Image: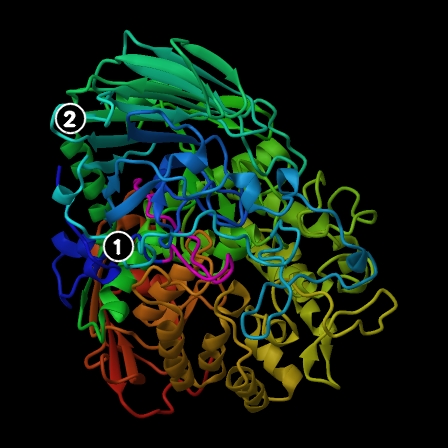
Amino acid sequence: MRFFRLASFASLLPVSAAHTPRNVLQHVNPLIGTSGPSPNSNGGMIPSVAPPFAMTRWTPQTRENFISQCPYSFDDAFIHGFQATHQPAIWMGESGQVVLVPGLGEVKAGFGERGRLKLWERSQAFLYEVELEIEPVDGGVDLMECLHSPVPGGAQAVPDEVKEGANGRVRRDERNGSDSHGDGELHLGSNDAAPACEKPEHGASGSNYNTSDSATRANGTLKVAMTASSHVGHLSIDFPQHGGISTAAGATLNPHIFIQATRQNWTGYINIDSINYEVSGSNPQRQDYALGPHRAPNFSGYFVSRFSEPFLSYGIAHGSNLTANHTQGTGEHLGAYVTFSASTSRVEVRTGVSFVSIAQARRNLDIEAPTSLSFDTAVQNLEEAWLEKLSRVTVKGANTTSAAHNQLTIFYTALFHALQYPADFSEPLHTITGGLRTWYEGYTDSVHIENDSYYQSWSIWDTFRAEHSLLTLFAPERVNGMMRSLLRIYDYSGRLPMWANVVETNIMIGTHVDAVIANALEHGFRGFNVSEAWEAVKKNAFEPPERDEELLYYDREGYTPMEVRAGLTGYMEKGYVPNDQWAEAGSRTLDYAFDDYAAAVVASHAGDNETAAFLFERSNNYRHLFNNATGFMQSRNANGSWANATYGWTEGDAWIYTFNVMHDVVGLASLFGSREAMKSKLDEYFSTGQNDHTNEPSHHAPYLYSALGYPYLTANLTRQIAVENYNATSSGLSGNEDLGQMSAWYVFSALGFYPLNPASGEYVVGAPFFEEMSIRLSGEAAAGEEEGVEGDLVISAPDAQTKSFVKGMSVDGRVLERPILRHDDLVKASRIEFEMTDEPTDWGSEGV
């Protein structure tokens, strides 16, 4: 086991500016995005270990997580355990977690009493290591003391002002201090962020680690190393190596591990098997249980922890109360503990996790981490899994102005973040890969067995913009399976998902899954039932949700039917969603117009040309919201009158949503009167600080310049936005990662192009950040099939380090005059050449 002492966050950062495919992992820093001043100004990331797209991620626990708080923050001083987490994003709930807590001497089961000072840590894509003080410090408080009356189940009541028409939703804007509902989901008694559950008192926050030498600590330290496979966490724990330590009274302090199965208000089960050195149990917690129509009543997270050493003693915990020698327990705040002989210097514990059963958790353990598998081999396996993905890209000519702005670290960590979701919830029955797999699905509350994967955790309002386009390039072998999973959700529930977290949560708005499917089809993927895909998308476009004329469908309104296109009744009748009848009506209208375009693309691929033509025409409905008198989009009431200009927006305002017409930039420009007039409006938008890259509705905005015929402005802005919103520190993401979208923007911008209209097969050109990038495109990316021939695509941009603007561009020698790349051309090309200059040019002035 390897441990490396670190004195600061910067010590984690690589300094080289060139690399080979074998060493790309040195540029990944999972601590990026793990801290920030508030839940919204925070990447919402954790330093997890797990393979790409894994069901379960393992993370150090510094906080008890809930909606608006992750289980880890870099700024916290104490480690309270090591958690198997299924919380996909900071604004979603946890499900079926388990926590392991190593210690010495008296067992401390309560969260606030079991924290140990973090002396140093090292986080890599494939291995997390930390050194801890032995003595626990009462340096934290329990979950309920951190929150101001959280609303159970993730739901919230509809505020009176929303009922009266102020039915938009905004995030906290740090620039002006406006109110916030986060992603509409901040469940606090006030609009302030939740306070941290602990405050360091030993100078150990941020990058100021306590680096006192271990030898000066009379009782030594605990060292924990952690790696994982898709369904198994593998911990190696080093206890002081001098045969146990003693208190002043002479009592020997034995090593122990506490296993937390459930928190308060959730009744779980736990069992200790001292003969086979195992602890198993279940945890039914699902923090989003009140959202959407599906209760998933039999959902549970199951686990089996297998230890390398025999138990000296054991017992059950209910809260902080321990009962020795008991081997089984049920109840809330439930856990178990096992102790080891005083001479034990190292314990390895493998924990299999399942959503199917304890037996399946044990099967996952036996298949993925059998006793014969050494910890070092487990580390190597995970290292190879990430290397296979990330080494598909090699980079030359990166800027590293400082450790905090190391472009290679930012780029490879972004790609690492973008290849974690959707998560594959299927579990192996016989072998790690291939063969029959099983999974629990909550829509019908049942277990399935099929020869396929099943993907969950779909944050589609966020990820439809660029993340799914990225997956078609960097994980194409997964795309067809993901599309089949979307259709399974349709089969199970009768609708495609919006924001699925085990089941549908009805978070956010729109049926942007239409664009995800359109994107796959436009990119050549056909390994799923296209006819059924069109059936599902057509239902989105023409069939309103249940109780559509009865409910506002306000964000996180509890116990509602599948929301899909709430307000579709009004939209189909009037061409817009009336603000005085449905929540977030302005944003819904614009989003539904885009979704109509996406649905039309799917219809075309399915051969329904008549409906495609109708939907292409209906995608012009965005025009109904353009107020010629003000030059802004504005919500309308049922009688056609303009609503208050601040009403009806989702995590944005009229500035941001006026440009939210990704599918028809030419048509939008015509509303302003000309391309030049729209450019002037964009100039005002950016120059007055209206762009908010911390949230997704602004992500496409800089690429509108290129589409209008001003690529030099896009090139300039993307570099500025990248520097201002991304860096290689723990606060290196200005906004929530949101299952890869924040990072997908950076990856595409670094490549030099971006999917402005993600329902199309086109990318709009910006300017590369690097002098040369070589991308190994698999056959799936080139053909959209399960098999194909691999090839390398070289993107060359000499002097890109110092020259920001594009003077000319060619694909395999074919000169491009317009700033547009077709996906077909991209994946079949061998070389894309950018001619760079340090002065703005008129290249690409034709626009789209």
Residue 448 lies, with reference to residue 794, above or below; the image says above
Pick whichever, 358 or 77, lies toward us.
77
Q: Is mark 2 on a helix, strand or loop?
A: loop
Query: Can residue 801 be seen here?
Result: yes
Q: Is residue 49 magenta?
A: yes
SS of the residue under disc 1: loop
Please name the residue that numbered disc 1 is placed on.
209
Of label 1 and label 2, which has the lower sequence position? 1
The extreme right residue here reads 639
* Magenta span: chief secondary structure: loop
- Residue 340 location (% of width, % of height): 24, 18
Answer few, some or many: residues within 10 Å of disc 1's Cα (few below 14, many 20 plus, some between 14 and 19): many
Residue in the foreground of this view, choosing between 747 and 11: 11
Q: Callout 2, which amino acid?
A: Ser
Separation (CA) of disc 1 from disc 2: 25 Å
Position of residue 225 relative to residue 302, above or below, is: below
| Residue at 27%, 22% in the rendered image | 367
- First to last magenta residue range: 33-53
As drawn, the residue found furthest toward the front would be 249
Q: Which of 790 and 366 is in front in this view?
A: 366
Q: In which quarter of the image is the N terminus?
A: top left
Neighbour tally class for label 2: few under 14, some 14-19, many 20 plus, Cα within 10 Å = some
| Residue type indicated by callout 1 | Tyr
- Asked whether, in this view, residue 219 is left or right of residue 475, the answer is left
Q: Can you tell which quarter of the image residue 396 is in?
A: bottom left
Location of residue 819 (image quadrant): bottom left
Q: Which residue matches tag 2?
A: 345
